[in-house]
């Protein structure tokens, strides 16, 4: 070839120079475990469903959510959202309102009539589920998804367990509960109401291959309180249960004008707030320890105090009379246990409601070989199976952390284990990736955005009625709230790695397909890892 | 601000792309079909700010001119690492000039294109701070005063990094270089010397003068786009951190540029016909120590007995920038 003056070589491209050989560290894309997912007792992939909600595809978000939890509208109301307590966004402004977006998706699904897609497979196996509370419904749902027939036996006339007979309507409207149960029935879950299982092994004989127990904890714990004949001492479970049957105000439990609730859990708060709504002038919670030690969740205590409920800390009830009670002041000792002080006080009370915890009715488990109970709890292994093969248990009867969300998680875990059991295997949960901590992220890139304040009904209104206390988000602010998610530890395709690479060594694969490193040219500078907002790139030393 | 920032959308316009935005609202760099004007395989150091800044700027210019672009490139890092004969990383028509005459070469190209009636093809001249603020300054000022139709881009890494980190007139006070050692009573580069060429460009009253950093891609692209809408002499001064010369970790390149802007050390603004039109305000103000500490060229300021008075003088310079350019957003 004829070359210009003083030119002896053809022009070449620098692509001949494989700068990847300079590298001592190589970047790798990873999916880390977002703290919300790690904290969720129901094992939801929260970051995963928010990803769809951010794009405004609410149905895809709802479907991703219900991969793990079939009750989003319920969960969006009654969950104590440990996810939000774990949210990395707290380090920037405030946690993402995960619970409110979940509720929005749940309500949207009810409004639009979204159904679960029918399961493709049919194993021909039948599984008995005892109890239609959150654990039972969750287990039945996941079993159905896995292709098994789930049949729920429920002793009560209506399904829902403690969600119906324990949680007040102002926290969980019954039309929401009914809608989510109906969707499960439409999906193929069979629910037999007024069907009490009194012996689990006998019930299993009826053509079932395995059983999941989720009978809940419906028996109120008692404390001995010397009480006069005319005194009125009730238990919280009965009061909340009777509320469910009370269609008319005069059918509601008679509590009087001055109601004392004894206990410090969420149930005590529920009863006190219910009493206030029934017209009590005074609702007083008596608790033997301090607010810091109270098992009830802080925001519920706060809402109760706002509604005019008073709380007597460090107090125990010594005796109950006709129109008053005597309480004794307590003091915490070195170990934090309350000790009596010998100081007494009388406070007027028309009734005393005991909210001291609940036990499970384990009568159906008598004479089950191998099954072990301890302090009223059924003992299960990591796969939720009792000592008797094929008998699984979850929910309130199998653990001390008694929330709807935990029960849903138990149901899911048990369903997977039952599926493995039915196929003659043992369930091994997949290994968990490392946690997406805030230190692994680059928060500079997230827009500043305040948390959407959920509309709170007027204080007077909620003191006098059973209307829902917390309002929901509309489509606009639900989208806004979803977009506050920082997608911790999981690529959300912001193009930063692709853009900031000085060596063009990141290949963009297109929407939904993320990116790939071109190790021929990547020099391993680590700018991509440093500038990845969500911490989805890891630098690892090269072997050679 | 040189562009309309997207207020929310998860990351707004802070990230390179944003899947929630329509494609036309994303940056040039986010596109899978961007030009990659400077290709892979170049010999720049790991984490080179200049290689990054050059791709950001020239890709944006290519986008703005629909690929009708010629580049003149001064001697310096950018030329050396991109074009060791016979290889080149450039995927644009590109000419290597001498160290000091890039502005003049670009002027000549623009004149030639005009004569050949190819006025649609635009000209960019580019160089480092040495080739711009020191050696090529006479040619640059001439290009400005003649209002030649050239966009001159200076990639400012604050020294002669290619030849072993010597001081330039863009090296900041107190910084250690090979020629301003950290010895004696006033270690590092002396105070009261050097120049800020964007302000000198401004004094020429040319149609467009702007500064930018590699940490604010959207701002940088908007400035290149605006510059290519205008005919006449235009000047864009981009701060490009140099891991080698500054003594920073390779992965900290963008972070250093961000810190320079957030501390007020480097003002990011835009001006037309000698008047400042907009500044990129500080988002989260930081003391200058945050910027100085990660850099080994300032290591002598810290150690066992920190030179608090020197740090205070650098802080005063940052504060003066904040005052002079109004870098703090009015609440």
Image: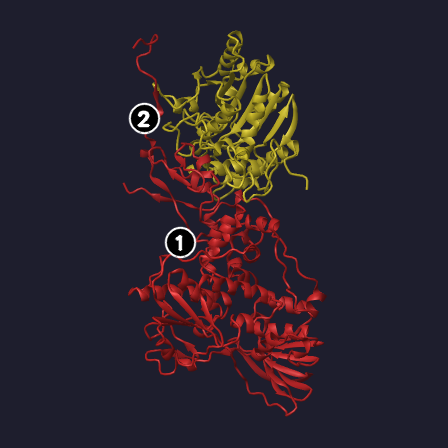
Chain colours: A red, B yellow
Instruction: Give the image location of residue A315, x and y in percent.
Output: 61, 80
* Secondary structure of residue under mark 2: helix
Instruction: Give the image location of residue B95, x and y in percent.
Output: 43, 16
Which labelled disc corresponds to residue A16? 2
Chain hosting mark 1: A
Whether residue A429 sits left or right of residue A445 in the image: it is left
Whether residue B280 sits left or right of residue B41 in the image: it is right
Q: Mark 1: few, some, or many residues within 10 Å (few <14, many ≥20)?
A: few
Judge if badges 1 and 2 mark residues of a common chain.
yes
Instruction: Give the image location of residue A123, x and y in percent.
Output: 34, 62
Label whose residue precedes the other's in the sequence (1 or 2) = 2
Instruction: Specify the quadrant that holds the N terminus of chain A.
Output: top left
Residue A470 vertical placement versus B272 (above, below): below
Residue bearing the label numbered 1: A434
Residue A47 vertical placement versus A348 (above, below): above
Which labelled disc corresponds to residue A450? none
Chain hosting mark 2: A
Q: State the residue in front, A332 or A167.
A: A167
Residue A390 vertical placement versus B74 (above, below): below
What is the quadrant of residue A276 in the picture? bottom right
Q: State the residue in front, B62 or A115.
A: A115
Query: Residue at horizontal 41%, vertical 60%?
Result: A145
């Amino acid at each position: 070839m004829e070359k210009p003056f003083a030119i002896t070589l053809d022009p070449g491209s620098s692509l001949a120079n494989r700068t990847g050989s300079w590298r001592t560290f190589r970047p790798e894309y990873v999916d880390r475990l977002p703290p919300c997912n790690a904290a969720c007792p129901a094992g939801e992939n929260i970051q995963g469903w928010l990803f769809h909600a951010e794009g405004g595809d609410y149905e895809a978000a709802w479907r991703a959510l219900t991969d793990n939890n079939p009750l989003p509208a319920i969960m969006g109301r009654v969950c104590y959202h440990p996810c939000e307590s774990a949210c990395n966004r707290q380090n920037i402004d405030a946690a993402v309102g995960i619970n409110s977006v979940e509720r929005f998706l749940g309500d949207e699904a009810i409004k639009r009539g979204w159904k679960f897609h029918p399961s493709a497979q049919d194993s021909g196996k039948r599984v008995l589920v005892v109890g239609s509370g959150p654990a039972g419904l969750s287990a039945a749902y996941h079993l159905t998804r896995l292709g098994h027939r789930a049949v729920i036996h429920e002793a009560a006339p209506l399904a829902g367990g403690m969600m119906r007979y324990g949680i007040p309507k102002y926290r969980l409207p019954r039309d929401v509960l009914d809608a989510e149960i109906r969707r499960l029935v439409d999906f193929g879950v069979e629910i037999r109401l007024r069907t009490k299982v009194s012996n689990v092994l006998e019930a299993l004989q009826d053509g079932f291959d395995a059983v999941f127990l989720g009978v809940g904890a419906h028996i109120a714990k008692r404390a001995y309180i010397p009480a006069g004949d005319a005194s009125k001492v009730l238990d919280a479970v009965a009061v909340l249960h009777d509320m469910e049957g009370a269609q008319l105000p005069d059918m509601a439990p008679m509590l009087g004008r001055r109601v004392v609730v004894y206990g410090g859990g969420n149930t005590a708060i529920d009863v006190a707030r219910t009493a206030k709504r029934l017209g009590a002038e005074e609702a007083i919670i008596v608790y033997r320890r301090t607010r810091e030690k109270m098992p009830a969740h802080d925001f519920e205590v706060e809402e109760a105090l706002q509604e005019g409920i008073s709380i007597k800390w460090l107090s125990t009830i010594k005796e109950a009379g006709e129109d008053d009670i005597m309480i004794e002041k307590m003091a915490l000792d070195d170990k934090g246990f309350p000790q009596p002080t010998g100081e007494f006080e009388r406070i007027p009370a028309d009734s005393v409601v005991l909210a001291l915890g609940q036990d499970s009715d384990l009568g159906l488990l008598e004479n089950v070989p191998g099954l072990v109970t301890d302090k009223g709890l059924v003992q299960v292994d990591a796969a939720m199976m009792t000592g008797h093969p094929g008998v699984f248990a979850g929910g309130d009867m199998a653990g001390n952390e008694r929330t709807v969300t935990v029960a849903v998680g138990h149901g899911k875990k048990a369903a997977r284990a039952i599926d493995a059991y039915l196929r003659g295997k043992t369930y091994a949960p997949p290994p968990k990736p490392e946690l997406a901590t805030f230190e692994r992220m680059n928060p500079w890139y997230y827009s500043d955005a305040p948390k959407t304040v959920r509309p709170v009904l007027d204080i007077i209104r909620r003191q006098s009625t059973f209307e829902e206390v917390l309002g929901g988000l509309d489509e606009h602010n639900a989208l806004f709230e979803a977009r506050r998610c920082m997608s911790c530890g999981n690529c959300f395709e912001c193009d930063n790695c692709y853009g900031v690479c000085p060596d063009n060594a990141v290949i963009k694969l297109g929407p939904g397909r993320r990116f790939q490193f071109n190790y021929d040219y990547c020099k391993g500078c680590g700018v991509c890892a440093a500038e990845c907002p969500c911490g989805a790139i890891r630098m690892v030393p090269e072997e050679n | 601000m040189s562009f309309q920032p997207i207020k929310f959308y998860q990351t707004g316009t802070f990230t390179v792309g944003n899947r929630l935005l329509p494609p036309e609202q994303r940056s040039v760099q986010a596109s899978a079909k961007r030009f990659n004007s400077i290709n892979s395989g170049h010999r720049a150091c790991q984490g080179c700010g200049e290689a990054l800044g050059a791709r950001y700027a020239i890709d944006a210019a290519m986008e703005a001119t629909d690929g009708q672009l010629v580049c003149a490139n001064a001697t310096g890092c950018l030329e050396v690492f991109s074009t060791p004969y016979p290889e080149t990383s450039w995927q644009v028509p590109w000419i290597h000039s001498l160290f000091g005459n890039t502005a003049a070469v670009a002027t000549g190209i623009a004149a030639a294109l005009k004569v050949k009636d190819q006025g649609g093809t635009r000209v960019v001249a580019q160089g480092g701070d040495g080739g711009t603020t020191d050696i090529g300054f006479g040619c640059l000022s001439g290009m400005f005063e003649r209002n030649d139709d050239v966009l001159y881009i200076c990639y400012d890494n604050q020294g002669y990094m290619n030849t072993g980190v010597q001081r330039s007139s863009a090296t900041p006070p107190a910084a250690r270089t090979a020629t301003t050692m950290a010895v004696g009573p006033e270690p590092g580069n002396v105070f009261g010397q050097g120049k800020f060429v964007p302000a000198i460009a401004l004094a020429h009253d040319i149609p467009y003068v702007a500064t930018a950093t590699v940490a604010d891609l959207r701002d940088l692209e908007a400035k290149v786009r605006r510059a290519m809408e205008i005919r006449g002499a235009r000047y864009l001064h981009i701060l490009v951190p140099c891991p080698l010369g500054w003594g920073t970790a390779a992965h900290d390149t963008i972070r250093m540029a961000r810190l320079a802007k957030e501390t007020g050390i480097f003002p990011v603004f835009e001006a037309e016909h000698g008047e400042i039109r907009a500044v990129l305000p500080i988002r989260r103000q930081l003391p200058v120590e945050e910027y100085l500490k990660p850099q080994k060229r300032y290591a002598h300021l810290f150690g066992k007995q920190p030179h608090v008075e020197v740090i205070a003088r650098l802080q005063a310079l940052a504060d003066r920038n904040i005052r002079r350019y109004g870098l703090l957003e009015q609440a």
